[in-house]
Amino acid sequence: MRLIHRQLERLEPTLILPLVKSDDELLIVQDWQEESNSANFAHKIDRKESLKLLVALHDTHKKIAWQRLSGLHTYSQLLKWQMRHMRFKSRQNEFLAFLTKEEIDQILHYSEKSLQLIAMENVPEKEITLLHGDVVHHNFLWCSDGKLRLIDFDLAHLGEADDEYILWLHRVLPAVDYDLGKVFEELPELKRLDKRKLHRLKYPNELLREWLFAVDLPLDQQLVFLDYLVPFTKRALTCWPKLWYDIDRMMKK
């Protein structure tokens, strides 16, 4: 992580918060920003600026040879998602206390079908670059100078930029009521994304990840988190058929 920061801190304009100087190489702390706020993907400006920031990060491969940096590796997004699907399926009985069997079956159905479609992709490989690895809203920080910057590179790895745009869209879509057309219309930068990869948006990544996280929480934290997660899940499942339709229609354009 420190090596990543040393490379990125040389670039202008800066995409990140600087690290606090420390004699301890194992201590990694980013500079504290007074009156800073996390991005809110429900706001258009936050969607626009966070995607712009990701594009700038991914374009750093033109100046920085990331593949030569020790400790950075690639991984298969498909394999990770297949493993997540299997973990969810193996623990489905634990979710019955909070979801109906129909809802669990729906999640598994969407997951299985989307993984089958992703496995059949025939898309040329693109340039490998640095990916942030965790594009959740609170890792985009509005700083005191009014600029949006990235924090927390502890999950950074190498890969194709398209993979991260997909993960970013997974995070953004719930904030816009799963209106895929709206996001593509307001953000022309998404033309970078190969439409043949849009099947990946059909994978219920947020649901699988959040439920696997929820069942391992201590009971008091679990109850609080479930107040958010149960209605979030029901809303997502209501929107998923239209999302699939919109994806298929967009891929045919």
Image (cartoon, helix red, strand yellow):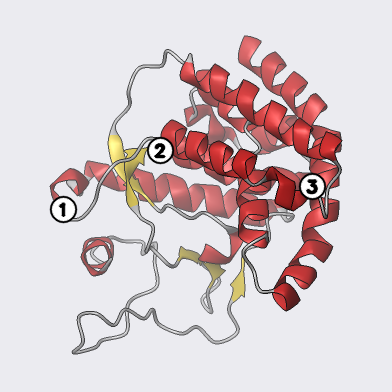
Q: Amino acid at mark 3?
A: Thr
Q: Which mark is residue 233?
A: 3
User: Tag 3's secondary structure?
Assistant: helix
Disc 2 or 3, which lies upstream in sequence? 2
Rounded to the nearest angstrom, the CA distance separating label 1 from label 2 is 18 Å
The residue that disc 1 covers is 69
Residue at the (35%, 17%) spot, across then down: 124
Discs 2/3, front: 3
Q: Is residue 91 left or right of residue 156?
A: right
Task: Let me know if residue 188 appears in the view.
Answer: yes
Horizontal and vertical percent position of residue 183: 69, 37
Horizontal and vertical percent position of residue 192: 47, 30
Horizontal and vertical percent position of residue 162: 45, 34
Rounded to the nearest angstrom, the CA distance separating label 2 from label 3 is 28 Å
Q: Amino acid at mark 2?
A: Ala
Quadrant holding the C terminus: top right
Rounded to the nearest angstrom, the CA distance separating label 3 from label 1 is 40 Å
**Is 250 placed above or below 11 here?**
above
**Is 68 placed above or below 89 here?**
below
Quadrant holding the N terminus: bottom left
The residue most toward the top is 252
User: Tag 1's secondary structure?
Assistant: loop
Nearest the camera: 173 or 187? 173
Q: Are marks 1 and 2 in contact (CB under 8 Å)?
A: no
Label 2 packing within 10 angstroms: few (<14), some (14-19), many (20+) = many
Residue at the (50%, 29%) spot, across then down: 193
Residue at the (29%, 82%) spot, across then down: 27
Disc 1 or 2, which lies upstream in sequence? 1
The residue that disc 2 covers is 161
Q: Are marks 3 and 1 in contact (CB under 8 Å)?
A: no
